[in-house]
Image (cartoon, grey):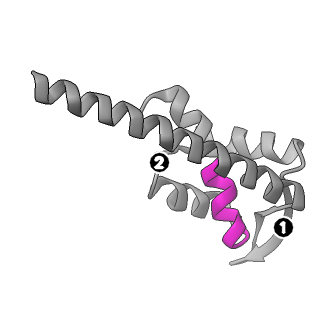
Amino acid sequence: MDTQLKKGLLDTCILKCLEKEDSYGYKLINDVSAHVEVSESTLYPILKRLEEAKYLSTYKEEHNNRLRKYFKITDEGRKKLKEQIKEVQKLREVIKFIEKEYEGEKENG
């Protein structure tokens, strides 16, 4: 997938995962990677940016005698997710147009 397109979708994927439940970095990597490939070096700066924008909050809990940092979507994050879903729906229309034009070109040869 194109890097710029992927960058734009990662925020939405992360917020969507956190809409369901609070999560921590490693689990988020696995959950998001099921749909869009993401690495630690990509994920953590995005999480930091989303937290600074007040779309996420964090808290720590002990797990196996270690503190684990959890991320939680905020009300602002839920609003942002709704906006991004509307944008994705618009993108879906553009993709349908492109695919339709591409299929027409393949048929004509």
Judge whether 30 appears above or below 10 on screen.
below
Q: Classify residue 42 as left or right of residue 65.
A: left
Q: Which amino acid does label 1 sit on?
A: Lys
Residue that carries the numbered disc 2 in the rendered image = 36
Say which of 46 and 5 sits in front.
5
Name the main secondary structure of what is drawn in magenta: helix
Say which of 38 and 81 sits in front.
81
> Dividing the image into 4 quarters, which one contains the C terminus?
top left
**Label 1, residues with CA under 10 Å away: few <14, some 14-19, many ≥20:** few
Element under disc 1 = strand
Residue 52, position as x, y percentages in the image:
88, 42
> Dividing the image into 4 quarters, which one contains the N terminus?
top left
Asked if the magenta segment contains residue 7, the reply would be no
Res. 49 image quadrant: top right
The stretch in magenta equals 12-22
Disc 1 to disc 2: CB gap under 8 Å: no
* Disc marking residue 60: 1
Q: Classify residue 87 as left or right of residue 59.
A: left
**Label 2, residues with CA under 10 Å away: few <14, some 14-19, many ≥20:** some
Q: Residue at x 86, y 65 (%)?
A: 59
Residue 60, position as x, y percentages in the image:
84, 67
